[in-house]
Amino acid sequence: MTAAELLDRYERMAVIRATEKAAHDMFLAGLVKGTTHLAAGQEAVAVGAAAALRPDDYVFATYRGHHHAIARGASPEACLAELMSKATGLCKAKGGSMHLTKADSGMLGSYAIVGSHLPMAVGAAWSATLRGTEQVAVAFFGDGATNIGAFHEALNLAAVWRLPVIFVCENNLYMEYTPIGTVTAVENPAADRAPAYRLPAEVIDGNDVVVVEEAVARAVDRARSGGGPTVLEARTYRHFGHSRTDPGKYRPEDEVRDWLARDPLTVARDRLAKLGVPDDTVSTVDATVKDQVAGAVDGAKNAPDADPAEALTDVWADGGAQWRT
Protein backbone atom coordinates (compact mmCIF):
# COMPACT_ATOMS: atom_id res chain seq x y z
CA MET A 1 0.00 0.00 0.00
CA THR A 2 1.38 3.39 -0.98
CA ALA A 3 1.62 6.31 1.42
CA ALA A 4 -1.16 8.12 -0.46
CA GLU A 5 -3.45 5.09 -0.21
CA LEU A 6 -2.76 4.65 3.48
CA LEU A 7 -3.36 8.34 4.14
CA ASP A 8 -6.73 7.94 2.40
CA ARG A 9 -7.59 5.00 4.64
CA TYR A 10 -6.48 6.98 7.70
CA GLU A 11 -8.74 9.89 6.75
CA ARG A 12 -11.72 7.58 6.33
CA MET A 13 -11.13 6.08 9.75
CA ALA A 14 -10.69 9.52 11.29
CA VAL A 15 -14.03 10.64 9.81
CA ILE A 16 -15.75 7.61 11.35
CA ARG A 17 -14.09 8.17 14.72
CA ALA A 18 -15.10 11.85 14.79
CA THR A 19 -18.66 10.98 13.75
CA GLU A 20 -18.89 8.39 16.53
CA LYS A 21 -17.64 10.97 19.03
CA ALA A 22 -20.25 13.42 17.78
CA ALA A 23 -22.98 10.80 18.15
CA HIS A 24 -21.87 10.14 21.73
CA ASP A 25 -21.84 13.83 22.60
CA MET A 26 -25.22 14.42 20.97
CA PHE A 27 -26.73 11.52 22.90
CA LEU A 28 -25.49 13.02 26.17
CA ALA A 29 -27.10 16.30 25.09
CA GLY A 30 -30.43 14.54 24.58
CA LEU A 31 -30.41 14.97 20.80
CA VAL A 32 -30.14 11.33 19.73
CA LYS A 33 -33.35 9.31 19.68
CA GLY A 34 -33.28 5.66 20.69
CA THR A 35 -30.27 3.54 21.54
CA THR A 36 -26.84 3.59 19.94
CA HIS A 37 -24.00 1.08 19.70
CA LEU A 38 -20.77 2.88 18.90
CA ALA A 39 -18.02 1.29 16.83
CA ALA A 40 -15.15 3.57 17.91
CA GLY A 41 -12.07 1.36 17.90
CA GLN A 42 -13.32 -0.93 15.14
CA GLU A 43 -12.88 1.47 12.20
CA ALA A 44 -10.07 -0.47 10.55
CA VAL A 45 -12.33 -3.46 9.87
CA ALA A 46 -14.90 -1.39 7.98
CA VAL A 47 -12.47 0.83 6.10
CA GLY A 48 -10.04 -1.95 5.19
CA ALA A 49 -12.82 -4.21 3.93
CA ALA A 50 -14.57 -1.45 1.98
CA ALA A 51 -11.33 -0.56 0.21
CA ALA A 52 -11.07 -4.13 -1.09
CA LEU A 53 -14.61 -4.19 -2.54
CA ARG A 54 -16.20 -3.01 -5.76
CA PRO A 55 -18.92 -0.36 -5.58
CA ASP A 56 -21.55 -2.93 -6.60
CA ASP A 57 -20.60 -5.51 -3.97
CA TYR A 58 -22.97 -6.14 -1.07
CA VAL A 59 -22.40 -5.40 2.62
CA PHE A 60 -24.52 -6.51 5.58
CA ALA A 61 -23.79 -5.18 9.07
CA THR A 62 -24.92 -5.45 12.65
CA TYR A 63 -26.61 -2.86 14.86
CA ARG A 64 -23.05 -1.61 15.53
CA GLY A 65 -22.80 -0.48 11.93
CA HIS A 66 -22.09 3.25 11.73
CA HIS A 67 -18.55 2.54 10.53
CA HIS A 68 -19.72 0.24 7.76
CA ALA A 69 -22.32 2.70 6.51
CA ILE A 70 -19.79 5.55 6.30
CA ALA A 71 -17.10 3.30 4.82
CA ARG A 72 -19.55 2.41 2.04
CA GLY A 73 -20.34 6.01 1.23
CA ALA A 74 -22.93 7.31 3.69
CA SER A 75 -22.19 10.86 4.77
CA PRO A 76 -21.61 11.71 8.43
CA GLU A 77 -24.40 14.28 8.23
CA ALA A 78 -26.94 11.76 6.90
CA CYS A 79 -25.99 9.27 9.62
CA LEU A 80 -26.19 11.83 12.43
CA ALA A 81 -29.47 13.18 11.08
CA GLU A 82 -30.86 9.63 11.14
CA LEU A 83 -29.86 9.27 14.79
CA MET A 84 -31.66 12.55 15.49
CA SER A 85 -34.86 11.48 13.66
CA LYS A 86 -34.46 14.18 11.04
CA ALA A 87 -36.06 14.22 7.60
CA THR A 88 -32.61 14.29 5.99
CA GLY A 89 -31.49 11.13 7.77
CA LEU A 90 -30.04 8.25 5.82
CA CYS A 91 -33.32 6.33 6.18
CA LYS A 92 -35.51 9.43 6.62
CA ALA A 93 -35.73 8.73 10.39
CA LYS A 94 -37.24 5.26 9.86
CA GLY A 95 -34.20 3.25 10.90
CA GLY A 96 -32.24 5.08 13.54
CA SER A 97 -28.82 3.95 14.71
CA MET A 98 -29.43 0.22 14.39
CA HIS A 99 -30.76 0.12 10.83
CA LEU A 100 -28.51 2.35 8.72
CA THR A 101 -28.96 1.42 5.07
CA LYS A 102 -27.62 2.79 1.79
CA ALA A 103 -28.73 0.38 -0.90
CA ASP A 104 -27.38 2.43 -3.80
CA SER A 105 -23.89 1.87 -2.37
CA GLY A 106 -24.40 -1.82 -1.71
CA MET A 107 -24.88 -1.24 2.03
CA LEU A 108 -27.93 -3.47 2.40
CA GLY A 109 -28.63 -2.70 5.99
CA SER A 110 -27.71 -2.96 9.65
CA TYR A 111 -29.65 -5.56 11.59
CA ALA A 112 -30.69 -5.55 15.24
CA ILE A 113 -31.47 -9.28 15.46
CA VAL A 114 -28.15 -11.00 16.18
CA GLY A 115 -27.07 -13.21 13.28
CA SER A 116 -30.19 -12.61 11.21
CA HIS A 117 -28.34 -11.00 8.33
CA LEU A 118 -25.92 -13.87 7.73
CA PRO A 119 -28.42 -15.95 5.70
CA MET A 120 -29.40 -12.73 3.89
CA ALA A 121 -25.80 -12.27 2.76
CA VAL A 122 -25.84 -15.85 1.52
CA GLY A 123 -28.99 -15.05 -0.45
CA ALA A 124 -27.38 -11.98 -2.00
CA ALA A 125 -24.36 -14.07 -2.99
CA TRP A 126 -26.65 -16.71 -4.50
CA SER A 127 -28.40 -13.99 -6.50
CA ALA A 128 -25.05 -12.74 -7.82
CA THR A 129 -24.12 -16.27 -8.83
CA LEU A 130 -27.38 -16.83 -10.68
CA ARG A 131 -26.99 -13.52 -12.50
CA GLY A 132 -23.32 -14.09 -13.28
CA THR A 133 -22.27 -10.65 -12.04
CA GLU A 134 -19.14 -11.69 -10.07
CA GLN A 135 -20.38 -9.58 -7.16
CA VAL A 136 -19.50 -10.68 -3.65
CA ALA A 137 -21.45 -10.30 -0.42
CA VAL A 138 -19.76 -9.51 2.89
CA ALA A 139 -21.44 -10.17 6.22
CA PHE A 140 -19.97 -8.42 9.26
CA PHE A 141 -20.97 -9.80 12.65
CA GLY A 142 -19.86 -9.81 16.25
CA ASP A 143 -18.33 -12.69 18.17
CA GLY A 144 -21.62 -13.34 19.94
CA ALA A 145 -23.31 -14.22 16.65
CA THR A 146 -21.10 -17.29 16.30
CA ASN A 147 -23.20 -18.98 18.99
CA ILE A 148 -26.40 -18.31 17.04
CA GLY A 149 -27.88 -20.99 14.79
CA ALA A 150 -28.06 -18.68 11.78
CA PHE A 151 -24.26 -18.45 11.75
CA HIS A 152 -23.91 -22.19 11.24
CA GLU A 153 -26.80 -22.41 8.78
CA ALA A 154 -25.32 -19.61 6.68
CA LEU A 155 -21.82 -21.10 6.61
CA ASN A 156 -23.15 -24.53 5.71
CA LEU A 157 -25.31 -23.40 2.79
CA ALA A 158 -22.63 -21.04 1.49
CA ALA A 159 -20.13 -23.89 1.56
CA VAL A 160 -22.47 -26.38 -0.13
CA TRP A 161 -23.19 -23.98 -3.00
CA ARG A 162 -19.66 -22.44 -3.05
CA LEU A 163 -21.13 -18.96 -2.95
CA PRO A 164 -19.16 -15.69 -3.22
CA VAL A 165 -19.73 -14.59 0.36
CA ILE A 166 -17.20 -13.49 2.97
CA PHE A 167 -17.97 -13.82 6.66
CA VAL A 168 -16.11 -11.22 8.73
CA CYS A 169 -16.31 -11.61 12.49
CA GLU A 170 -15.51 -8.43 14.41
CA ASN A 171 -14.34 -10.15 17.56
CA ASN A 172 -14.22 -7.43 20.22
CA LEU A 173 -14.01 -10.11 22.95
CA TYR A 174 -17.40 -9.41 24.51
CA MET A 175 -20.88 -10.56 23.59
CA GLU A 176 -22.65 -7.60 25.17
CA TYR A 177 -21.30 -7.86 28.76
CA THR A 178 -20.07 -11.47 28.71
CA PRO A 179 -16.53 -12.40 27.63
CA ILE A 180 -16.94 -14.63 24.57
CA GLY A 181 -14.23 -16.97 25.85
CA THR A 182 -16.25 -17.96 28.93
CA VAL A 183 -19.16 -19.37 26.93
CA THR A 184 -17.48 -20.76 23.81
CA ALA A 185 -15.66 -24.07 23.45
CA VAL A 186 -13.05 -22.84 20.95
CA GLU A 187 -10.50 -20.06 21.25
CA ASN A 188 -11.42 -18.32 18.00
CA PRO A 189 -15.23 -18.44 17.83
CA ALA A 190 -15.52 -17.91 14.07
CA ALA A 191 -12.25 -19.10 12.55
CA ASP A 192 -12.00 -22.30 14.59
CA ARG A 193 -15.45 -23.40 13.44
CA ALA A 194 -14.89 -22.79 9.73
CA PRO A 195 -13.08 -26.11 9.13
CA ALA A 196 -16.25 -27.97 10.12
CA TYR A 197 -17.73 -26.59 6.90
CA ARG A 198 -14.50 -27.06 4.92
CA LEU A 199 -14.08 -23.30 4.65
CA PRO A 200 -10.76 -21.45 4.69
CA ALA A 201 -10.32 -19.11 7.65
CA GLU A 202 -7.89 -16.53 8.97
CA VAL A 203 -7.50 -14.74 12.29
CA ILE A 204 -6.26 -11.22 11.56
CA ASP A 205 -5.37 -8.01 13.39
CA GLY A 206 -8.60 -6.04 13.09
CA ASN A 207 -6.92 -2.85 14.29
CA ASP A 208 -4.53 -2.67 11.33
CA VAL A 209 -6.29 -1.35 8.24
CA VAL A 210 -3.56 -2.65 5.94
CA VAL A 211 -3.85 -6.19 7.29
CA VAL A 212 -7.64 -6.10 6.98
CA GLU A 213 -7.62 -4.79 3.42
CA GLU A 214 -5.10 -7.40 2.29
CA ALA A 215 -7.01 -10.26 3.93
CA VAL A 216 -10.35 -9.18 2.49
CA ALA A 217 -8.78 -8.68 -0.94
CA ARG A 218 -7.51 -12.29 -0.87
CA ALA A 219 -10.95 -13.55 0.11
CA VAL A 220 -12.62 -11.41 -2.56
CA ASP A 221 -10.30 -12.76 -5.26
CA ARG A 222 -11.10 -16.30 -4.16
CA ALA A 223 -14.83 -15.62 -4.19
CA ARG A 224 -14.88 -13.94 -7.61
CA SER A 225 -12.89 -16.79 -9.15
CA GLY A 226 -15.38 -19.39 -7.95
CA GLY A 227 -13.43 -20.50 -4.89
CA GLY A 228 -16.36 -20.00 -2.55
CA PRO A 229 -16.68 -18.46 0.92
CA THR A 230 -14.04 -17.41 3.42
CA VAL A 231 -14.26 -16.78 7.16
CA LEU A 232 -12.17 -13.93 8.56
CA GLU A 233 -11.95 -13.27 12.28
CA ALA A 234 -10.73 -9.73 12.97
CA ARG A 235 -9.53 -9.23 16.54
CA THR A 236 -10.51 -5.73 17.63
CA TYR A 237 -11.89 -3.79 20.61
CA ARG A 238 -14.66 -1.29 21.16
CA HIS A 239 -13.68 1.87 23.03
CA PHE A 240 -17.12 2.41 24.53
CA GLY A 241 -19.44 0.01 26.35
CA HIS A 242 -21.90 -2.22 24.55
CA SER A 243 -24.52 0.49 24.13
CA ARG A 244 -25.37 3.98 25.29
CA THR A 245 -26.22 2.88 28.85
CA ASP A 246 -23.16 0.71 29.38
CA PRO A 247 -20.05 2.21 31.03
CA GLY A 248 -18.10 -0.97 30.29
CA LYS A 249 -16.79 -1.32 33.85
CA TYR A 250 -16.76 -5.14 33.59
CA ARG A 251 -13.61 -4.99 31.45
CA PRO A 252 -10.25 -5.20 33.28
CA GLU A 253 -8.39 -1.88 33.37
CA ASP A 254 -5.15 -3.37 32.05
CA GLU A 255 -7.01 -4.97 29.14
CA VAL A 256 -8.61 -1.66 28.20
CA ARG A 257 -5.28 0.13 28.49
CA ASP A 258 -3.48 -2.39 26.29
CA TRP A 259 -6.10 -2.27 23.57
CA LEU A 260 -6.33 1.52 23.58
CA ALA A 261 -2.58 1.57 22.95
CA ARG A 262 -3.30 -0.38 19.77
CA ASP A 263 -5.92 2.11 18.54
CA PRO A 264 -6.46 1.68 14.76
CA LEU A 265 -5.66 5.35 14.19
CA THR A 266 -2.41 5.02 16.15
CA VAL A 267 -1.45 1.91 14.18
CA ALA A 268 -2.09 3.75 10.92
CA ARG A 269 -0.13 6.81 12.07
CA ASP A 270 2.84 4.59 12.91
CA ARG A 271 2.68 3.00 9.46
CA LEU A 272 2.49 6.44 7.84
CA ALA A 273 5.56 7.58 9.75
CA LYS A 274 7.48 4.53 8.53
CA LEU A 275 6.48 5.43 4.97
CA GLY A 276 7.95 8.89 5.46
CA VAL A 277 4.71 10.87 5.75
CA PRO A 278 5.37 14.01 7.82
CA ASP A 279 3.42 14.57 11.04
CA ASP A 280 2.22 17.89 9.63
CA THR A 281 0.49 16.09 6.78
CA VAL A 282 -1.40 13.84 9.19
CA SER A 283 -2.27 16.86 11.36
CA THR A 284 -3.70 18.61 8.31
CA VAL A 285 -5.93 15.59 7.65
CA ASP A 286 -7.07 15.63 11.27
CA ALA A 287 -7.97 19.32 11.04
CA THR A 288 -9.88 18.76 7.80
CA VAL A 289 -11.82 15.88 9.34
CA LYS A 290 -12.64 17.95 12.43
CA ASP A 291 -14.12 20.73 10.27
CA GLN A 292 -16.00 18.24 8.09
CA VAL A 293 -17.70 16.51 11.01
CA ALA A 294 -18.42 19.82 12.77
CA GLY A 295 -20.24 20.88 9.63
CA ALA A 296 -22.12 17.58 9.59
CA VAL A 297 -23.23 18.11 13.19
CA ASP A 298 -24.50 21.60 12.40
CA GLY A 299 -26.30 20.35 9.30
CA ALA A 300 -27.99 17.54 11.20
CA LYS A 301 -29.03 19.79 14.07
CA ASN A 302 -30.55 22.35 11.70
CA ALA A 303 -32.32 19.82 9.48
CA PRO A 304 -36.12 19.64 9.60
CA ASP A 305 -37.76 17.02 11.79
CA ALA A 306 -39.20 13.99 10.07
CA ASP A 307 -42.81 14.34 8.94
CA PRO A 308 -45.05 11.67 10.54
CA ALA A 309 -47.05 11.62 7.32
CA GLU A 310 -44.04 9.99 5.65
CA ALA A 311 -43.94 7.06 8.09
CA LEU A 312 -45.48 4.53 5.70
CA THR A 313 -43.55 5.54 2.58
CA ASP A 314 -40.57 3.55 1.30
CA VAL A 315 -41.95 0.36 2.79
CA TRP A 316 -41.86 -1.41 -0.56
CA ALA A 317 -39.58 -0.95 -3.57
CA ASP A 318 -42.30 1.02 -5.35
CA GLY A 319 -42.47 3.45 -2.44
CA GLY A 320 -45.91 2.34 -1.27
CA ALA A 321 -47.22 0.88 1.94
CA GLN A 322 -49.78 -1.66 0.74
CA TRP A 323 -49.43 -5.22 1.95
CA ARG A 324 -48.94 -7.70 -0.87
CA THR A 325 -50.55 -11.12 -1.17
Image (tube, helix red, strand yellow):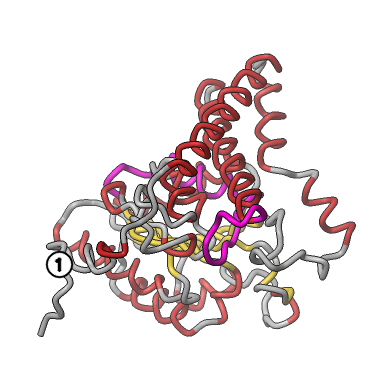
In percent of width and height, residue 126 lies at 24, 67
Residue 117 position (above or below residue 237)? below
Say what secondary structure mark 1 lies in: loop
Q: Nearer the viewer, residue 5 or 317?
A: 317
- Return the residue found at the far right: 254
Residue 257 position (above or below residue 231)? above
Can residue 144 be seen from the camera position used here?
yes
Q: Is residue 57 left or right of residue 291?
A: left
In percent of width and height, residue 317 lies at 16, 63
Residue 115 position (above or below residue 290)? below
Q: Nearer the viewer, residue 285 or 212?
A: 285
Assign the magenta stretch its main secondary structure.
loop
**In the image, is residue 39 part of the stretch drawn in magenta?**
yes
- Return the residue found at the far left: 325
Q: Nearer the viewer, residue 238 or 182?
A: 238
Residue at mark 1: 320
Q: Residue at x 70, y 22 (%)?
A: 274
Q: Residue at x 43, y 57 (%)?
A: 85
Residue 216 position (above or below residue 149)? above
Quadrant of image for the C terminus: bottom left
Residue numbers of the magenta segment = 28-57
Can residue 205 be seen from the camera position used here?
no
Q: Is residue 289 left or right of residue 92?
A: right
**In the image, is residue 67 part of the stretch drawn in magenta?**
no
- Going by the numbered disc 1, the residue's amino acid type is Gly
Q: Residues within 10 Å of mark 1 (few under 14, many from 20)?
A: few
In percent of width and height, residue 151 lies at 47, 77
Q: Residue at x 63, y 63 (%)?
A: 171
In percent of width and height, residue 140 lies at 48, 61
